[in-house]
């Protein structure tokens, strides 16, 4: 009984692992396909489906192709894992279960507390509208700064996704260089989620401005060189980051940074004309090197 039971059990378990992985890969491919069909109006709106999911179609297609091409190796690996799983060794089962959970959550864009693919998986169902019908009170523009500098901080490529006209307000950061130029940047260079709290922005003054600028210069140099930690930024830049990547390659070197400024910008979005214009700018803080 024991001699035949163990091989049969390992065989069934191996087949179950292969079937489960195939199911996960199939769903991982189906989700971006549904997102693409939804975006193109071929199917109706799916409330729980992330708008970002369709952009993962190339990755999901590659995953599915790899699963098919390397199916023999996958089956052999599953057989080895099944043989390794001893009935009485709970730790081994926990290890395999955690690996399957991580693989599944990564493929399906799940948010389960211990791992997720970040902000792109959120649907923002209960987030208030960013674009408001009425302009904020007391809008003004600084007289000594060219409005084109503020407009350079905008990303017009998002306009096709905007469904209404109105006013939107948010923060932007600029770097100041020795040549007198003021160029768009963002908090991503600070490498922390809440830089204003971390470095102490209070009443227009950065409490730890020397440390803030040192971090900014350090990571600016890496971004300007196309690096992110030890990998190229095209590979390593996390998709869940709050701030979109900026091309710093044409900026002056990090050694020329003399300061940074943080502003609140208000823009007017015209959904019909597909234009966005800066209508208000208020400086929050000036950080000097």
Image (tube, rainbow, N blue to C red):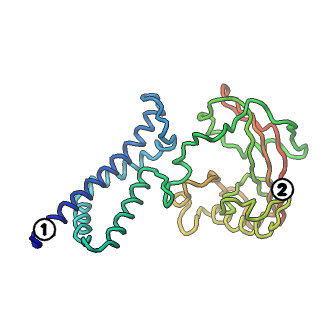
**Which corner quadrant holds the N terminus?**
bottom left
Instruction: Name the secondary structure under disc 2.
Output: strand
- Drawn side of residue 286 relative to residue 88, left or right: right
Q: How many marks?
A: 2
Q: Nearer the viewer, residue 146 or 111?
A: 111
Q: Determine the residue positioned at 66% across, 39% down.
A: 128
Q: Quadrant of residue 133?
A: top right
Residue sitting farthest toward the right: 143
The x, y position of residue 252, in whole percent, is 73, 60
Identify the mark nearer the N-term, 2 or 1: 1
Q: Quadrant of residue 88?
A: bottom left
Residue sitting farthest toward the top: 272
Dot 2, how many residues are within 10 Å of its Cα: few (below 14), some (14-19), or many (20+)?
some
Q: Determine the residue positioned at 54% across, 46% down.
A: 122
Instruction: Name the secondary structure under disc 1.
Output: helix
Q: CA distance from mark 2 to mark 1?
A: 72 Å
Location of mark 1 (residue): 5
Q: Nearer the viewer, mark 2 or mark 1?
A: 1
The x, y position of residue 62, in whole percent, is 37, 51
Q: Determine the residue positioned at 15% across, 69% down.
A: 6
Image height check: is 213 above or below 45?
below
Q: Which numbered marker is on residue 189? A: none
Image height check: is 48 above or below 251?
above
Q: Which numbered marker is on residue 285? A: 2
**Which corner quadrant holds the C terminus?**
bottom right
The x, y position of residue 4, in whole percent, is 10, 69
The x, y position of residue 138, in whole percent, is 88, 37
Dot 1, how many residues are within 10 Å of its Cα: few (below 14), some (14-19), or many (20+)?
few
Q: Nearer the viewer, residue 64 or 185?
A: 64
- Drawn side of residue 114 relative to residue 242, left or right: left
């Amino acid at each position: 009984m024991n001699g035949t039971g163990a091989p049969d059990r390992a065989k069934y378990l191996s087949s179950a692992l292969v079937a489960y992985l195939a199911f996960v890969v199939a769903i991982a491919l189906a989700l971006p396909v549904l997102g693409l069909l939804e975006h193109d109006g071929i199917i109706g709106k799916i409330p729980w489906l992330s708008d970002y999911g369709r952009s993962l179609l190339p990755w999901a297609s590659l995953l599915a192709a790899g699963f098919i091409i390397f199916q023999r190796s996958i089956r052999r690996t599953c057989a080895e894992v099944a043989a390794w799983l001893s009935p009485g060794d709970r730790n081994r089962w926990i290890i395999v279960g955690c690996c399957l959970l991580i693989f599944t959550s990564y493929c399906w864009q799940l948010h389960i507390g211990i791992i997720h693919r970040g902000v792109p998986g959120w649907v923002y169902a209960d987030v208030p509208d960013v674009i408001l019908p009425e302009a904020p009170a007391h809008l003004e523009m600084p007289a000594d700064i060219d409005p084109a500098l503020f407009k350079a901080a905008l990303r017009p490529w998002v306009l096709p996704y905007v469904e209404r006209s109105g006013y939107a307000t948010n923060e932007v950061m600029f770097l100041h260089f020795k040549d007198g130029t003021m160029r768009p940047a963002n908090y991503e260079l600070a490498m922390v989620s809440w830089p204003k709290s971390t470095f102490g922005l209070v009443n227009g003054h950065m409490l730890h401005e020397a440390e803030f600028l040192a971090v900014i210069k350090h990571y600016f140099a890496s971004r300007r060189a196309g690096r992110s930690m030890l990998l190229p930024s095209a590979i390593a830049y996390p998709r869940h980051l709050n701030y979109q990547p900026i091309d710093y390659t044409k900026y002056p070197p990090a050694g020329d940074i003399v300061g940074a400024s943080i502003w609140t910008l208000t823009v007017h979005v015209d959904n019909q004309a597909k234009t966005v214009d800066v209508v208000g700018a208020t400086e929050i803080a000036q950080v000097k090197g």
